[in-house]
Amino acid sequence: MKSEQTDFEREIAQLLVSSLNLALDPVSIDPEAPLFREGLGLDSIDMLEIALAISQHYGIQMRSDDPENGTIFASLRALTAAIKARRA
């Protein structure tokens, strides 16, 4: 069963869809589903695009060499939590 998105998760999902030109409705993204491989099927180039969009939109630096990237980009929910933590 798919989890419900929070308002902030919906905002980040919209950012993902628009920055990656994905042909899907942002609300259809399960916040707990993987973003990469079997989930949305994103790749490392997409991760860079997402990091750039987040940096531009929220003023948060996300580094490509961050050892936490696997955790940060694991799902929409994890990404949203990381953004919230870095904004605090």
Image: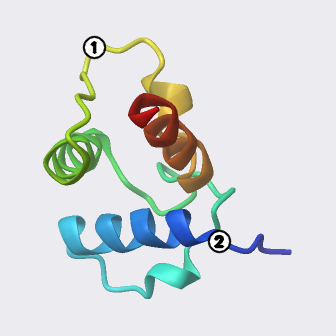
Q: Is residue 17 above or below residue 51?
A: below
Q: Residue furthest front?
A: 88
Q: Nearer the viewer, residue 10 or 28?
A: 10
| Residue at horizontal 23 percent and vertical 28 percent from the top | 61
Q: Residue furthest right?
A: 1
| Residue at horizontal 13 percent and vertical 48 percent from the top | 56
Query: Dividing the picture into quarters, in which one does residue 12 lie?
Result: bottom left
List the residue tagged with mark 2: 5
Q: Is residue 46 above or below residue 29?
A: above
Left or right: 36 as drawn, with respect to 38 = left
Residue 26 percent location from the top left of the image: 45, 80
| Residue at horizontal 42 percent and vertical 70 percent from the top | 11
- Helix, strand or loop at label 2? It is loop
Amino acid, disc 1: Asp
Left or right: 42 as drawn, with respect to 70 = left
Q: Is residue 4 above or below residue 61?
A: below
Mark carried by residue 65: 1
Q: Nearer the viewer, residue 53 or 43?
A: 53
Disc with the residue nearer the chain's start (2 vs 1) = 2
